[in-house]
C-alpha cells in the first residue's frame, strides 16, 4: 500500500510540474507587425484602456496541494512514531500548498487582460482584448494587427 501511494503521489507531482512554466506569457500572439512607410489603413489612436479580470491568488491550488502533500507526508512517515507522522504531515502540507499555489498561478497566467479601444484613421472604433499592453497608453498611435494593438 505504501509503495502504491508513493507511486501515485510521484506521478501526480510530475504531472502537475509539467503544467508549470516560468517563461513569460505573451498571450499567445505572434510577433509585432512589420512596419511600412505606406499609408496605414489599420492604424489609429488609443482612446481608452479598460482592465478586465483580476489577478488570481492561487488559493485553490494551495488547498489542493496542501491536502495532497499532507496525505503523502503522513504515508511516508514511519508508522511507529506519532511525532514523526505529525511532523511529516505538516511539512507535506506546507510544501504541497506552496507548490500547488505556484502551479495554479503559472497556469492561469495572471488573469488580467485589457480592452484597448482604438479610433482608426478612417474613423472606425475597434476594441481589442490583450493580456499585455507593451507600452501602450491612452493617446498612443498603434497598429491593430493579429487581433491586438501594437505600438508604432
Image: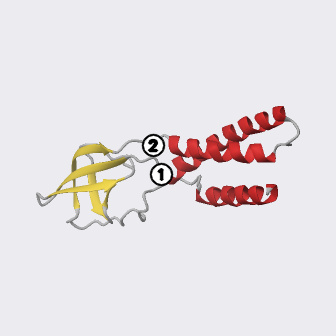
Which quadrant, please, contains the C terminus? bottom left
Marks counted in the figure total 2
Residue in the image at 28% along x and 59% along y: 143
Residue in the image at 51% along x and 44% along y: 60
The image's colouring method is secondary structure
Percent coordinates x, y for residue 80 in the rendering = 88, 39
Residue that lies at the very extreme toward the left in this rendered image: 123
How far apart marks 1 and 2 lie (CA) works out to 7 Å
Percent coordinates x, y for residue 88 in the rendering = 78, 38
| Residue closest to the eye, 121 or 60 | 60
Residue in the image at 34% along x and 64% along y: 35
Confirm whether residue 152 shows in the render: no
Which quadrant, please, contains the N terminus? bottom right
The residue pinned by badge 1 equals: 108
Q: State the image quarter where residue 11 is shown.
A: bottom right
Q: Which mark is residue 134?
A: none
Percent coordinates x, y for residue 61 in the rendering = 55, 46
**Residue 147 appears left or right of 65:** left
| Residue closest to the eye, 130 or 107 | 107
The residue pinned by badge 2 equals: 56
Count neighbours of disc 1 (C-alpha within 10 A) and say few if under 14, some if 14 to 19, many if 20 or more.
some
Residue that lies at the very extreme toward the top in this rendered image: 83
**Residue 133 appears left or right of 10:** left
Of the two numbered discs 1 and 2 on the same chain, state the one appearing first in sequence: 2
Count neighbours of disc 2 (C-alpha within 10 A) and say few if under 14, some if 14 to 19, many if 20 or more.
some
Contact check, label 1 and label 2, Cβ < 8 Å: yes
Amino acid at each position: 500500500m505504501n509503495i502504491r501511494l508513493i507511486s501515485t503521489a510521484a506521478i501526480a507531482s510530475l504531472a502537475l510540474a509539467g503544467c508549470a512554466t516560468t517563461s513569460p506569457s505573451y498571450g499567445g500572439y505572434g510577433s509585432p507587425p512589420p512596419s511600412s512607410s505606406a499609408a496605414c489603413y489599420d492604424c489609429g489612436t488609443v482612446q481608452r484602456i479598460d482592465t478586465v479580470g483580476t489577478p488570481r491568488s492561487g488559493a485553490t491550488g494551495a488547498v489542493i496541494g496542501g491536502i495532497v502533500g499532507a496525505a503523502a507526508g503522513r504515508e511516508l512517515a514511519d508508522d511507529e512514531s506519532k511525532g514523526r507522522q505529525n511532523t511529516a504531515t505538516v511539512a507535506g502540507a506546507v510544501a504541497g500548498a506552496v507548490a500547488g499555489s505556484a502551479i495554479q498561478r503559472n497556469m492561469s497566467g495572471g488573469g488580467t487582460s485589457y480592452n484597448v479601444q482604438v479610433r482608426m484613421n478612417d474613423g472606425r472604433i475597434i476594441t481589442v482584448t490583450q493580456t499585455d499592453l507593451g507600452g501602450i497608453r491612452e493617446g498612443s498611435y498603434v497598429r491593430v494587427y493579429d487581433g491586438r494593438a501594437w505600438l508604432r
